[in-house]
Image (tube, rainbow, N blue to C red):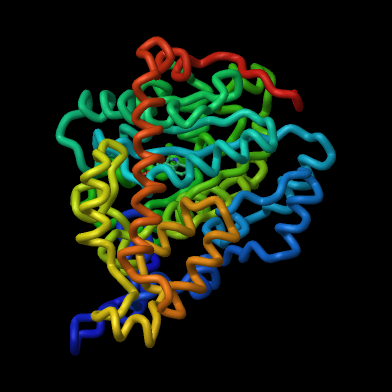
Amino acid sequence: MTSVKSKPSDGKPEEDVVDPWTVKAVDDKGVDYDKLIEKFGSKRIDKALLKRFEKVTGHKPHHMLSRGIFFSQRDLDFILDCYESKKPFFLYTGRGPSSEAMHMGHLIPFIFTKWLQDVFDVPLVVQMTDDEKFLWRLADADEALRLTYENAKDIIALGFDINKTFIFSDMEYIGSQPAFYKNIIKIQKCVTYNQVKAIFGFNDSDNIGKISFPAIQAAPSFSNSFPQIFGEDDVGKTPCLIPCAIDQDPYFRMTRDVAPRLNYPKPALIHSVFFPALQGAKSKMSASDPTSSIFLTDTPDEIKEKINKYAYSGGQDTEEKHRKKGGDCEIDIAYQYLTFFMEDDARLEQIKKDYTSGKMLTGELKKELIIILQKLVSDHQKQRKAVTEKMVKDYLTPRALHFKSK
Ligand code: TRP
C-alpha cells in the first residue's frame, strides 16, 4: 500500500494516500501526481509521446490526453510499436458495480477507452468485478450480479462497437470459461500472502476472498483468458493496453511482476487522474455521497443546483474583490470539470483567461459547466433507454469479435 502514516501531532496525513480504496490529498489542489509517478514508478506522458501517438495513429490526441487527464503510462510506446507494425493487441478495462447510479467520474475511463478503441480498431474486454464488490461491500451476491447488468447498460450506452467489445461478469465468466480460471490460479500460485500484504495493505482480519481477488483483476490482461476472441491455440502472447484511473495501478504492478514468470507479455497501462468531488480536489467522488457527485440519473435541475450549491469555487467572496483579484482555476472545481468535458480547446483557454483576470464571475463559469453537463447527462439517459435487455445479453455473451488486425 502507498499510504503513509499520519502525523500524530495534528492528525493530518503528511502525504497523499492513493490506493484502490482511498484517495486523499494533503493539498487543496489535489493529489501531487508528479510524486505519485515517482512512487509508483510509471512514466509521465510527455509531448514527445503525444507527438508519436499522432504520427503513428493519424489522430489528434483526445483532449483528455492533450490536457494531461490521462497523464501517466507504462509501455505505451510498445503498444504504438505494435500498432505501427500491424501486430494485434487488445484493450482491457473494468468497473466494480457497487451502485445502481454511476456518476460522471465513472464515465471518464470508458469515454476514453471508447475513443482508443475507435482509433486502434482492436478488441476490448470489460471486466465487471461483481465478485470484488461482494467481497468488499455488498451483502448479497445476487445484488452484485444484478448491478453488473445495470452498469453494463451505462457502458453500452456510450456506443462501444458490439463487434469488438466483450463485457463480462466475473461471477459468470469464471464459471463458464476454464481458460480464465486457469490464468487466475496460475497468478495466485506466483504471489505470496506477504506480497499482497505489501502491495495492498491487507491484514490478518481481511477475508480470504479479498486476498485472492487481485489475481482475478490481473487475469484479463492475458489474451488466452479469452479463447473465443483470440483463438483456442492462443498462448497468451497478444499484448494488452489497460486504460484506468491511477488508483488501480497496484493491481497491474503485481500483474507485470508475474507476467514474465508465466511467459506472458506485461500489460501496458495508461493512467488517468481522479475526477474530483464537487467539494474539492482533495478527494475523489463517492457514489455513496449524493452531494459529492453528478450522477448519470440526475435531472437538469439537480445538476444545476448541485453545481451552484456545492462546487468548490476558486473565486473571491465578493464581486468587487473578484473583479480585482480574479479566480484561481487550479482549485476551482467548475473549471476542473470543464477540462474533462469541454471539447473546444480555444473556448476553454478563453474561459481560463477571463476567470483568472476577474472578467468572468463564478456564476458565469458555473453556467458554462451546467449547460455542458445537462446535455451530456440527458443525452446519456436517452442512449441508456435505447439499450435493450437483448443488447445487454449480446454484449455479455462470449463470442468471436471482429477486428482488422486479426
Ligand atoms: N477494480 C475496479 C473497480 O473497482 C474494476 C476493474 C477491474 C478495473 N478490472 C479493471 C478498472 C481494469 C480498470 C481496469 O472499479
Q: Nearer the viewer, residue 270 or 213?
A: 270
In the rendered image, residue 293, in percent from the top left (x then y), is placed at: 27, 51
In the depicted structure, whether residue 133 falls above or below residue 304? above
Q: Nearer the viewer, residue 283 or 157?
A: 157
Q: Quadrant of residue 236?
A: top right
Residue ranking furthest to the bottom: 9
Side of 180 relative to 78 (left or right): left
* Residue found at x 68% / y 31%: 121
Side of 51 relative to 260 (left or right): right
In the depicted structure, whether residue 41 falls above or below residue 265? below
In the rendered image, residue 166, in percent from the top left (x then y), is placed at: 52, 24
Task: State which quarter of the image contains the N terminus.
Answer: bottom left
Residue ranking furthest to the left: 139
In the depicted structure, whether residue 227 falls above or below residue 67? above
* Residue found at x 52% / y 58%: 69
Asked if one can make out residue 50 in the rendered structure from this viewpoint, the answer is yes
Side of 282 relative to 143 (left or right): right
* Residue found at x 35% / y 35%: 378
Q: Quadrant of residue 112?
A: top right
Task: State which quarter of the image contains the C terminus.
Answer: top right
In the rendered image, residue 29, in percent from the top left (x then y), is placed at: 39, 74
* Residue found at x 33% / y 69%: 362
In the rendered image, residue 222, in percent from the top left (x then y), is placed at: 59, 35
**Ligand 1 quadrant in view:** top left
In the depicted structure, whether residue 30 falls above or below residue 320? above
Q: How many marks?
A: 0
